[in-house]
Image (spheres, grey):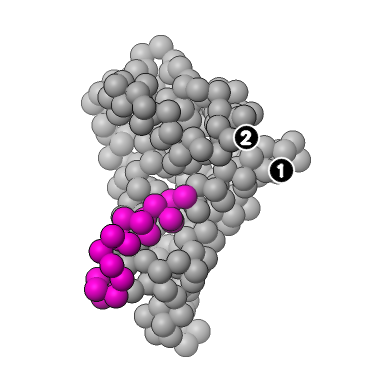
Amino acid sequence: MLAAILLSALAMSAIVAVRYLITSGGFAFATRVRQPGLYAGLDPQIRREIAWSLASALIYGIPAGVVAWGWQAQGWTRIYTDVGAYPLWYLPVSVLLYLAAHDSWFYWTHRWMHRPRLFRAAHAVHHASRPPTAWAAMSFHPWEALSGAIVIPALVFLIPIHVAALGCVLTIMTVMGVSNHMGWEMFPRWMVQGPAGRWLITASHHQRHHEQYNCNYGLYFRVWDRLCGTDRGLGEFRKGRR
């Protein structure tokens, strides 16, 4: 049993690492096409981002692999495969529940990480990316990576979710994590500056966090930032960024 759990954890870590390399690599390539020269001179930083991110992939993969084994071998979780087990309307609702829960956890732990001692001990690794690139999404100190790695594995014990809906949550998590750091806005201006943009976080919103540090702590939604008075609006990209 122990060997099976270990194998599952290592396999999941490899999957997370490959997912990171493909997604960040894809957005980095898109940046080269859409914003040529944007990452010029940042090669040493990018190498550090990749190294920290691959270490984070190992940390993220361990609890995910243990939970995956528990789901398959022991039926521990509330992940289900029969689409008829719950009403169809619950599929999008479960995705929103997971995103809202993850966003809440991220907001408060992220804000906590900005306390001076914790920032110096852990979160400074992420903010060492100046400016952040598409490779920085998982560039975390191990302690910070651990705080993020436990969220989704914990939620699958609490909130029922279809395996496809869980895949949707993980896809959104990956894409938003990378695109919010790539240094330019991929969404159209009418969306970012319109009604949807007032509640959704995109690269423009997260850029302000990397500029000022003490604001814009959310991951997907601006709800907690608005409720707690930490929303400072949209940031500006350096010359050559859109």
Circle 1 packing at 10 Å, graded few (<14), some (14-19), many (20+), is some
Image location (x, y in percent) of residue 236: 45, 17
Residue 98: in magenta span: yes
Q: Quadrant of residue 35?
A: top left
Would you place residue 190 above or below residue 230 in this image?
above
Is tag 2's residue or tag 1's residue first in the polypeptide sequence? 1
Image location (x, y in percent) of residue 139: 51, 43
- Amino acid bearing label 1: Leu
Q: Quadrant of residue 167?
A: bottom left
- Label 2: which secondary element: helix
Direction right: furthest residue: 117
Image location (x, y in percent) of residue 118: 71, 43
Image location (x, y in percent) of residue 103: 50, 47
Residue 3: in magenta span: no
Q: CA distance from mark 2 to mark 1?
A: 21 Å
Magenta segment's dominant SS is helix
Question: In this rendering, which labeled residue sits more in front, label 2 or label 1?
Answer: 2
Q: Which mark is residue 228?
A: 2
Residue under the image location 37 percent in, 21 percent down: 193
Q: Indicate left or right for 182 with 127 as reference.
A: left
In-front residue for pair 47/16: 16
Q: Is residue 51 visible?
A: no
